[in-house]
């Protein structure tokens, strides 16, 4: 039965509108799948000569047993994968996958396209082995700061405070980790990074919650503030005293017993440094806490209906302060990955916009920890792919390759996500009556 709502003589048929939107989304998603399949067949498949072999490498040293590298008939495999993608697109357009199976179908489409693309890369490189395991390792490494930045955004925005300042929090964390990591040691440098990020979060909380400053504008201002402040400190004393103030020891790799020797999974997940393992822990902690604990229920209540939360005795402002500061500390750890977690020394604007990509991952992931992590891995893969292609297929213009992570960001947020809804009170100041 159609539900009608009338306001000043305007009648809206809710279920008809919803059905129209559902059909439009189904057709749109199916059309994207079909277009991707056609590109796979036409642009990638026809570019590989018949009978040309492609080689994919999965093997790694120090594992219990070796995984054989895969040699494939490139053209046939690419075309077959393209056909699978087209068929999935047709099914989505004509029948539609259920809400539970659509993410699986989307993952299959993405994996099929990327496998076809890697086969094409191997063929373009005249049969050179494509190190798939190395590509995945680089993807995780590049995704770690994005994951931590996105988790920081989850903590803040689920509480009702927009966090555009992730970039500044990460930059402050990177600077603090380099400076205090040099003076006090890399582990204490991590602690300093969390403190620096937390202080940036405190600034965000004070001006957004206490003084009701526009949160988007405030986030941009804090990013510029962090860029200028860290740049000033770097010029003032770190650059001229590099040996004593800007040469932190990079955190060493920690191989977990037994797990690190598993084929493929071991080198991929369990041969990493402390920041990566902290990211694993925080993913689980934030997800479980947000959806399985009383604190999580209160946080979501504050972000959705702060007035209702206040009426049942929840201190809305204290909850927001606490979560924003914690979110800033998590983002600071993400910034530490750029210094003590990878390259060592600090340089101006070392985060290079990764905080904004983390913000995009948060939106793409629909303000959930799991979705944000998946989106961050996608963007990390785009960055790793850009690095690999610059070496494997140098004929592709370097400027085009540098665009890949940002193109993936724009497409994901503007196209693939569709209509998303932030927490209802996100960005809305709360003033007690």
Image (cartoon, grey):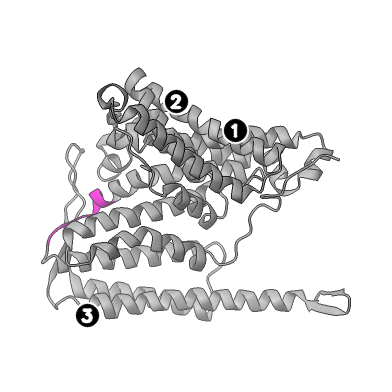
Image quarter for residue 326?
A: top right
- The answer to whether residue 214 is above or below residue 340 is below
The reply, left or right, for residue 246 in relation to residue 392 is: right
Residue name at image x 34 percent, y 46 percent: 142
Mark 3 Cα shell of 10 Å, populated few (<14), some (14-19), many (≥20): some
User: Earlier along the polypeptide chain: callout 2 or callout 3?
Assistant: 3
| Residue linked to disc 1 | 202
User: Earlier along the polypeptide chain: callout 1 or callout 3?
Assistant: 3
- The disc at residue 192 is 2
Mark 2 Cα shell of 10 Å, populated few (<14), some (14-19), many (≥20): many
Q: Are marks 1 and 3 in contact (CB under 8 Å)?
A: no
The reply, left or right, for residue 232 in relation to residue 102 is: left
From which residue to which does the magenta span run? Answer: 128-135
Image coordinates of residue 158 in percent, x first then y, are 63, 45
Q: Secondary structure at mark 3?
A: loop
Q: Is residue 132 magenta?
A: yes
Which image quarter holds the C terminus? top right
Q: Secondary structure at mark 1?
A: helix
The reply, left or right, for residue 211 in relation to residue 112 is: right
| Residue linked to disc 3 | 46
Residue name at image x 39 percent, y 55 percent: 379
- The answer to whether residue 341 is above or below residue 109 is above
Q: Secondary structure at mark 2?
A: helix
> Is 80 or 322 nearer to us in this picture?
322
Which image quarter holds the N terminus? bottom right
- The disc at residue 193 is none
Mark 1 Cα shell of 10 Å, populated few (<14), some (14-19), many (≥20): many
The reply, left or right, for residue 349 in relation to residue 163 is: left
Q: Is residue 407 magenta?
A: no
Q: CA distance from mark 1 to mark 2?
A: 15 Å
> Is 76 or 295 nearer to us in this picture?
295
């Amino acid at each position: 039965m159609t539900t009608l709502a009338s306001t000043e003589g305007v009648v809206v048929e809710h279920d008809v509108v919803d059905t129209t939107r559902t059909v439009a989304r189904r057709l749109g998603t199916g059309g994207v799948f079909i277009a991707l399949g056609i590109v796979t067949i036409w642009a990638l498949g026809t570019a590989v000569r018949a009978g040309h072999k492609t080689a994919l490498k999965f093997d790694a040293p120090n594992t219990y047993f070796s995984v054989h590298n895969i040699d494939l008939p490139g053209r046939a495999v690419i075309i077959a994968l393209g056909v699978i993608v087209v068929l999935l697109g047709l099914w989505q357009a004509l029948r539609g996958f259920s809400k539970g199976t659509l993410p699986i179908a989307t993952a299959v489409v993405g994996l099929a396209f990327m496998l076809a693309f890697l086969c094409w890369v191997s063929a373009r490189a005249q049969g050179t082995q494509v190190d798939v395991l190395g590509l995945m390792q680089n993807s995780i490494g590049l995704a770690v700061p994005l994951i931590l930045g996105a988790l920081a955004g989850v903590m803040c925005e689920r509480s009702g405070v927009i966090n555009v300042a992730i970039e500044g929090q990460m930059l402050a964390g990177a600077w603090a980790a380099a400076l205090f990591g040099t003076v006090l040691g890399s582990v204490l440098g991590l602690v300093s990074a969390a403190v620096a990020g937390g202080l940036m979060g405190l600034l965000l909380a004070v001006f957004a919650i206490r003084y009701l400053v526009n949160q988007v504008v405030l986030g941009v201002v804090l990013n510029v503030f962090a860029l200028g402040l860290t740049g000033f400190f770097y010029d003032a004393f770190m650059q001229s005293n590099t040996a004593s103030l800007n040469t932190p020891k990079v955190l060493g790799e920690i191989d977990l017993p037994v797990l690190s020797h598993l084929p493929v999974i071991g080198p991929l997940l369990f041969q990493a440094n402390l920041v990566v393992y902290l990211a694993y822990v925080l993913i689980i902690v934030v997800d479980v806490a947000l959806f399985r604990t009383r604190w999580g229920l209160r946080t979501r209540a504050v972000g959705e209906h702060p007035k209702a939360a206040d009426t049942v005795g929840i201190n809305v402002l204290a909850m927001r302060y606490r979560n924003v500061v914690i979110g800033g500390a998590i983002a600071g750890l993400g910034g530490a990955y750029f210094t003590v977690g990878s390259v060592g020394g600090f340089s101006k604007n070392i985060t290079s916009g990764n905080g904004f990509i983390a913000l995009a991952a948060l939106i793409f992931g629909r303000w959930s920890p799991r979705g944000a992590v998946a989106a961050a891995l996608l963007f990390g893969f785009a960055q790793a792919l850009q690095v690999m292609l610059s070496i494997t297929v140098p004929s592709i213009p370097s400027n085009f390759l540098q665009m890949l992570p940002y193109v993936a960001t724009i497409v994901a947020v503007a196209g693939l996500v569709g209509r998303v809804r932030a927490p209802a009170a996100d960005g809305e100041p709360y003033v007690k009556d």
